[in-house]
Amino acid sequence: MGNRKQESMSFREGVDRMVDRATLAIGLDPDLARMIRACNAVLQVKFPVRLEDRVEVFTGWWATHSAHRLPAKGGLRYSPFVDQNEIEALASLMTYKCAVADIPFGGAKGGLVINSSAYTEAELRQITHAFAMELARRDFLHPGTNVPAPDLGTSSREMAWIADTYKTLYPEDLNQDACVTGKPRNRGGIAGRTEATGKGIQYALREFFRHADAVAAAGLTDGLAGKRAVFQGLGNVGYHTAKYLSEQDGVVVTAIIERDGVIVNEEGLNVHDVKQHLAETGGVKGFPGGVYSENGADALEMECDILVPAALESQIHAGNAMRIRAGMIVEAANGPVTYEADQILRDRGVTILPDVFVNAGGVTVSYFEWTRNLSHMRFGRLQRRYDELRGRELIATIEAITGHRVPEEMAQRVSKGASELDLVRSGLDDTMRQAFQEIREVLKAYPAIKDYRTAAYVVAIAKIAQSYYDLGLTASPKPVS
């Protein structure tokens, strides 16, 4: 999949530099900028777990970057390579991401040092239970303060285990389901959460391609149909993004990079078939629908219209940024482009849709799930049948006026009430559209800002600064206008 290259600054330092660039662009007070950058709290825990024939000690973290809004929200990742610097960087990204998407959460992130493949499901449940106990006892797991969600190496399964642990500790909490998001549907989850990040990326790209001037500035032609895309990573985010873009928007996925190399087909890969092969074999090697190469990192430099890094951070760095030949980069992963590489690509005029905006779909639908859990009612329950009744009355009125019967298929479409999934996707689409429009407003208001990343950070920083001002912690923030 490509190796992370050592840069002159850490991941956390790179994020802070991106924030500095935005604060300088709008002339934000330096003290306020330092307040926004600061990570509020970091918890490190080391805890033993007695497994079947041994005792192991595990290390985990939870970082709350900002509590200007509560709860603080962030993914929980399981990885053998996770460390405190990475968790702090990702927590800060969550703060800015929530602000860009206008989600009333602070930013947080959690991580556990573990190679999940080395443990049985029963052992993973024990380990997750112990980690959740450590977080909950220190008030780093609660519907009103810190709410985890799935991330790299975790899924709805782990979220269900954490929720069960919380319920065991606090059975009297009526809002106990809201202690985590990304749960299974039958355990308080919400329709559309699993594919939310990928669906949000699709909506973000659709909105981008609605603006002819933005498309022209990226050196691309109108419309998503026929655009050639290279994907790095076919996990949850990469798979759903590639699947929706190829099946619904006509994007041609020419290459998919995974841990063992890359599979290429200039005519287009069948994303579903590649995913199935990956699940069966553990890699892309041997997939019959394309040409395999073990040099996955080199495929990032393939010529294409859209490059979608959807794997780990720091995959595009100072060592390969000059060789990137994509018309635009869509950051499906968190931090896939380092600060140094971002500068190189900006100077080259490469358009980047930044992670802080483009992959906000996950936290957006997590917000919907959290509010659903607090309301104790699924979306659409009150109005769905009423909408259907109104639709049928409309059809009957049309038929009475015209004297003609409306075709049954058309009548069903008009009278159909919105399901929970319909409402979730409508809200997600609206969120991504609105966020991109706010970013464009910044570009218009500040001609010196030329890139979407800086503009997105300005949107986020302005909202956070306003929150601090409302709390009386700072003088009136400089308006973004």
Image (tube, rainbow, N blue to C red):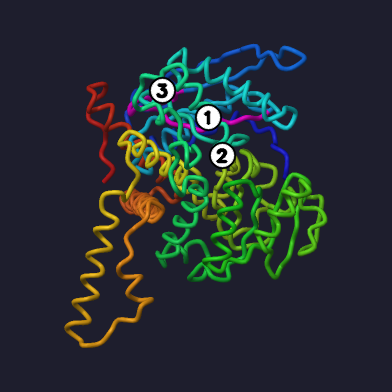
Toward the viewer: 323 or 204?
Answer: 204
Q: Are marks 2 and 1 in contact (CB under 8 Å)?
A: yes
Q: Relative to 359, is 9 above or below?
A: above
Please identify, in this view, whether the residue under mark 3 or under mark 2 is nearer the observer.
3
Q: In what quadrant of the picture does the N terminus appear?
A: top right
Disc 1: which residue = 89
Image spot of residue 175 (x, y percent): 35, 27
Is residue 297 found inside the magenta-colored segment of the image? no
Disc 3 marks a residue whose amino acid type is His
Q: Is residue 110 visible?
A: yes
Q: Which residues are magenta?
A: 64-79
Image spot of residue 185 (x, y percent): 47, 42
Toward the viewer: 184 or 12?
Answer: 184
What residue do we see at 40% from left, 46% from top?
455
What is the spatial separation of the Cα atoms under label 3 and label 2, in whole angstroms? Answer: 27 Å
Disc 3: which residue = 142
What residue do we see at 35% from left, 76% from top?
410
Does residue 127 appear left or right of residue 424 in this picture?
right
Disc 1 marks a residue whose amino acid type is Ala
Disc 2: which residue = 335
What residue do we see at 40% from left, 31% from top?
178
What is the spatial separation of the Cα atoms under label 2 and label 1, in whole angstroms? Answer: 9 Å
Does residue 110 appear left or right of residue 267 in this picture?
left
Q: Relative to 35, is 27 above or below?
A: below
